[in-house]
Image: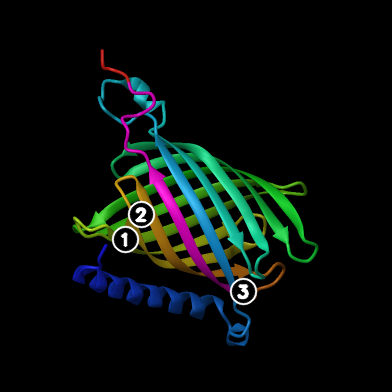
Amino acid sequence: MHAPSWLIKSLRQVLSVGLLLAFFTLSVFLPPAQAQNLKTELWLANEFQLTLSPETDPNLAWHDIIPDQMRFYTELQEGPVFPDIHQLLWRIGPIWNLTPHFSVAAHFTNSAVQNLENRRFIEEHRLELEPLFRGKFGEQIGWANRHRIEYRVRADNQRWRYRNRLALSFNQPGSDWTPFVSSEFFFDFGGEGLNQNRSVVGVGYQLNPSLRLNLSYMLRFVKQSGGNAWDPIHVAFVSLSYQSKEGGVFQMQSD
C-alpha cells in the first residue's frame, strides 16, 4: 500500500476545497463569540449492500420491480462528552438503479438519541425516500447529489425533514485511493427551517473489490433549539462499506 504522486496532488485539491467549505460554513453559521465553544464527536459506521437483481436483460420486466440492492446500515455517534453515546442508528431498505446516473432508495430507519441532561434516550422511527443523481466531470472527478425526504416519528411529535448532499470524489484509474469532499444541508418542516449543515473532507481506500474504508473529518453545525445560534462540532468519522459483487440473489435465466 503506497501513496502515488497523483494522490498527493488530489489530497491537496481536496484540502483546498475542504478549506473553502470550512470557510463558507464558518462565515455563514459561526458568530465570533461562539469560537470558544467547539465540541468533538466520534462516528463509527458500517454499510452492507447486497446485490439482489442486477440488470442483465432488458426483456426481464420483473427487474423493474425487484430492487438492485438491499442496504443495511448502522451508525454509532459518541460525544460531545466521551464516552457518552450521542446516537445509535440503523437503516434498512432497497435500492433501484433506474439509469446509470439516477437511483432511488427507500429506507426504514430507527434511531435513539441521548438527552445529555437526563441521560435518557429518545427513540425515533423514520420513513425515507432517497433519490440520487450522479455523474462525472471528465475522467477523474465524480459527483453525486443525494436528496433525502424523511418522515420522522417520535412519541411526542411527527415531522418532515429534507436533506440535500453534494459530494465530489477525485478518482484515478488503477489506484485504490479516492479523496472526497461533501456538504449537506438539513431543512426541518416542523418550524425550524434550515437547522444543520455537515461539511466533510476525507479519503477512501479500496481494501478489495467489495470492501472500502473511509476516513474523514466533518465540520458539523447544529442550530440551537428556539434560537438563531449555531453549535459547531468537530467530528472524526470512520466508516466501512461492503458492496457484494455476486450475480444476485434473485438471478434467473432469460426465457
* Quarter of the image that includes the C terminus: top left
Q: How many marks?
A: 3
**Which amino acid is tagged 3?**
Trp
State the CA–CA distance, disc 1 to disc 3: 28 Å
Farthest residue, direction top: 255
Which mark identifies residue 144?
2
Q: Nearer the viewer, residue 229 or 122?
A: 122
Q: State whether residue 202 is above or below residue 110.
A: below
Local SS, label 2: strand
Give the residues drawn in magenta, as a range: 232-251
Crowding at mark 1 (Cα within 10 Å: few <14, some 14-19, many 20+): many
Mark 1 or 2: in front is 1
Q: Position of residue 175 (x, y in %)?
A: 22, 58
Is 243 in the magenta? yes
Q: Position of residue 142 (x, y in %)?
A: 28, 57
**Which amino acid is tagged 1?**
Ser
**Which amino acid is tagged 2?**
Ala
Q: Position of residue 35 (x, y in %)?
A: 58, 84
Q: Which residue is mark 3?
A: 230
Q: Nearer the viewer, residue 41 or 201?
A: 41
Crowding at mark 3 (Cα within 10 Å: few <14, some 14-19, many 20+): many
Reading the chain from its start, which is encountered first: label 1 or label 2? 2
Q: Nearer the viewer, residue 144 or 252?
A: 252
